[in-house]
Amino acid sequence: MKNKKIFLVAVFFLIVIILGSLFARDLKRKGIMFSDTEIEENENKTLADNPATDLKSFEADTTIKNVVFKPTGVFSSSGAFNEAIYENPELKGVLVRVEWKDIEPSPGQFNFSLLKAQIDAIKKHGKLWSLAVLGGPFSPKWLIDDYAFNTDYVTYNWRGSENRLPLAWNEIPKERVKILAEKLAEEFGDDPNLALVYVTQFTQNGIEGQLPFNNMLTDSSWEQKGWTEDVWVNAVTEIAGYFSNAFKNKAIAVEVHEVLENKNVPIRIMNTLWNDPSFEKRAGVAVWWLSGKTTYQHDLINALKNYDGDIYVQLIGNSNQKDRFLNGDFSESFKQAKNIGARYIEPWEIEFTKDKWNSIFNDFNNYSHGL
């Protein structure tokens, strides 16, 4: 009798062990429980390895530590104060953009009230926001005029006015944009609703990667000022590093264009951002000229199709500007965005005030959900 009791107890414990093992394996499969090795691996993941696609689901995944949130879906390229856009159910967030000169009117004196007003309006509606501070011709005047800085620049005609553009490879502009990045990060870097930071550039419009052509310059040529392919690539990636180091837990993006008809420049920048370990796979590229067409910057479009990194896009125009889109069809730009593997897209503000494109927005949101 005693032996029978011992046997039954042994069988009972054996069953408990087996059931416990099966239960643990099921928990592990569902991502509820991790081995020590898996926990260590997860601590070094980025969102690219994680299917979470919006801030709520991302924050709810408590099994992942030290993960960088990378936004997906449809954002408006402007319109923080436009109440109508928030009624659109497909809106994920809004781009906030300001000119550098307006937030640092004198050296080291920052005024973020213009930024904060837009951010507060967006967060009131529970949406995410992206940040773009325009440099280039929108850099502070003191950067050129103040004798303490007296940085070198080029002058060019654009949109009927004369503009001055500091040279990105000179030390003083780099030092000042580094301070800008650090101050922005001090103020906004811990905001969980901040989804993406565009890198400020010393370019024709201060964010997009193109430079004004030599025939637009009024005082010299780029080559006379010291421009070379290597000089430019090094300057852009160095400035990107300032933003990456300042915003340590944020996704950043550098807008890319062919530069002075040089097709190698954007591809070299793309590859550096993704392959340089110092960027920690947080630095993607942006394309603010998507249209569905492949005739414009054809080689760069092909390079983007084969790019392993993150791609963030903005449309080249609004849907009323039919000539700007392939076959006059606004929806072609969304097809192209998916074709190049973009995870994020910014139509113009006006598109969110009408229901015409909601099915296209919904399709992109669903597509990008798994990226």
Image (tube, grey):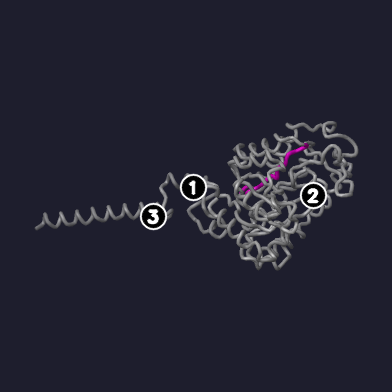
Disc 2 secondary structure class:
loop
Disc 3 secondary structure class:
helix
Residue 367, horizontal then vertical, whole percent? 56, 54
Which amino acid lies under the numbered mark 1 shown in the image of this protein? Asn
User: Mark 1 or 3 closer to N-term?
Assistant: 3
User: Mark 2 or 3 closer to N-term?
Assistant: 3
User: Mark 2 or 1 closer to N-term?
Assistant: 1
Q: Is residue 18 left or right of residue 96?
A: left
Res 329 seen here: yes
Q: Main secondary structure of the magenta part?
A: loop
Which amino acid lies under the numbered mark 2 shown in the image of this protein? Gly
Q: Residue at x 73, y 37 (%)?
A: 235
Q: CA distance from mark 2 to mark 1?
A: 39 Å
The answer to which quarter of the image holds residue 212 is top right
Q: Which mark is residue 42?
A: 1
Q: Above or below — where is 190 with respect to 121?
A: above
Q: Is residue 295 left or right of residue 6?
A: right
Per the image, is 252 magenta?
yes
Q: Residues within 10 Å of mark 1 (few under 14, many from 20)?
A: some
Q: Circle 2 sits on which residue?
A: 108
Frontmost of labels 2 and 1 is 1
Which amino acid lies under the numbered mark 3 shown in the image of this protein? Leu
Q: Give the residue furthest to the left.
A: 1
Disc 1 secondary structure class:
helix
